[in-house]
Amino acid sequence: MIVVLKPNVGQEKKDRLIEWLKGMGLGVHISEGEYQTVLGLIGDTAKVDMELIDSLDIVDSVKRVSETFKCCNRKFHPDDTVVNIGDVKVGGGNFVLIAGPCSVENEDQIVSVAKDVKAAGANLLRGGAFKPRTSPYDFQGLKGEGIELLKIARKETGLPIVTEIMSIDDLPLFEDIDVLQVGARNMQNFDLLKELGQTGKPILLKRGLANTLKELLMSAEYIMASGNENINLCERGIRTYSDYLRNTLDLAAVPMLHELSHLPVIVDPSHATGIARMVPPMAMAATAAGADGLIIEVHNDPPHALCDGAQSLRPEEYAELVKKIKAVREVL
Ligand code: PEP
Ligand code: MN
């Protein structure tokens, strides 16, 4: 249920209403907009007397929210959420460029790619230290050592770092990481989501290979219900009948997620297509569709990459692409 307050309601009256609602055993999510405050009520609202609340002089309107996702629902929070990652802002008109190799391989590699993507205009460095691979015989990532190398690359460039967490047990290693990525394969690892809710850290939540938008939003809800609102949703392609492409990039997910939720939406054209030459057109299309950012794989030597070389851009290709993305943004 949402309770929209009239404009310019005094703080004392607002607090009294919130306390009264909490006294009924409800969670109250407060969204302070530019003109109005919206209270999102969570819990058993069946017994709440809507007419009574509606009749209060400080209340503008009361509505039931039928969707099962509440905290991430646009109705609970009409303004776009802006996620802050150091000095970098995502959402609400702030566009973010995230780039780097699929896997951190060694210090020279990650530092050189970090410098190159920074020079091209990237705001955040991505690199996998823990890699969820389909085959147990494939490179599994440098794990803790990879995290340390990412920190070196951050020190060299000043770029905040994004890296994937696969297990709650690894959380202590991620204390100093700027953005924790939840990979497609872990989108419904609910124990992990709940634990990430406790961290308060910015999260990049990727859509599962075969998950609906509602399921993605319910996963965001797990993190938010546990107390963390700093979530970036990520469309990274889904399994369809696609034969020549790794996945199908669901671009309509971008405006639909914006309609349903206030969270920023980032697009990953690398995993969505699996082919480096498909990345630029899809990156531009995603930008035109209103994405709040792009996460793109960039490698200094794609043919010899330990993971996802076929979809990785070379630094100079990435630099060219960034110019085009900026041109698309200007048109918008
Ligand atoms: C990745 O970002 O390298 C990755 C494994 O992505 P996804 O979880 O989307 O497959
Ligand atoms: Mn990858």
Image (cartoon, rainbow, N blue to C red):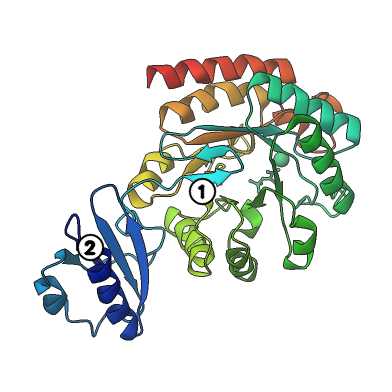
Name the residue rendered at 40%, 47% in the picture.
Answer: 257
Q: CA distance from mark 1 to mark 2?
A: 35 Å
Asked if residue 263 is positioned above or below residue 14 in the image, the reply reads above
Give the percent coordinates (x, y) of residue 11: 27, 64
Whether residue 22 is visible: yes
Instruction: Indicate the quadrant containing the C terminus: top left, top right, bottom left or bottom right.
Output: top left
Does residue 55 appear left or right of residue 242 in this picture? left
Whether residues under marks 1 and 2 lie with C-beta atoms below 8 angstroms apart, the answer is no
What amino acid is found at the position of numbered circle 1 in the picture?
Leu
Disc number lying in front (1 or 2): 2
Image disc number at residue 10: 2
Q: Which residue is located at x 49 percent, y 58 percent? A: 229
Q: Does residue 32 sit above or below 92 in this rendering?
A: below
Image quarter of residue 187: bottom right
Disc number placed over residue 249 in the picture, else none:
none
Residue on which disc 1 sits:
233
Q: Secondary structure at mark 2?
A: loop
Kind of residue at badge 2: Gly
- The location of residue 287, given as percent across then percent down, is 47, 28
Badge 1: how crowded within 10 Å, few (<14), some, or many (20+)? Answer: many
Q: How many marks?
A: 2
Ligand 1 location (quadrant): top right
Q: Where residue 244 sits in the image (x, y, percent)?
A: 61, 31
Asked whether the viewer can see residue 1, the reply is no
Q: Of label 1 and label 2, which has the lower sequence position?
A: 2
Q: Compared with residue 94, is residue 120 higher up or lower down, i.e. above or below? A: above
In the depicted structure, whether residue 262 falls above or below residue 56: above
Q: Quadrant of residue 188?
A: bottom right
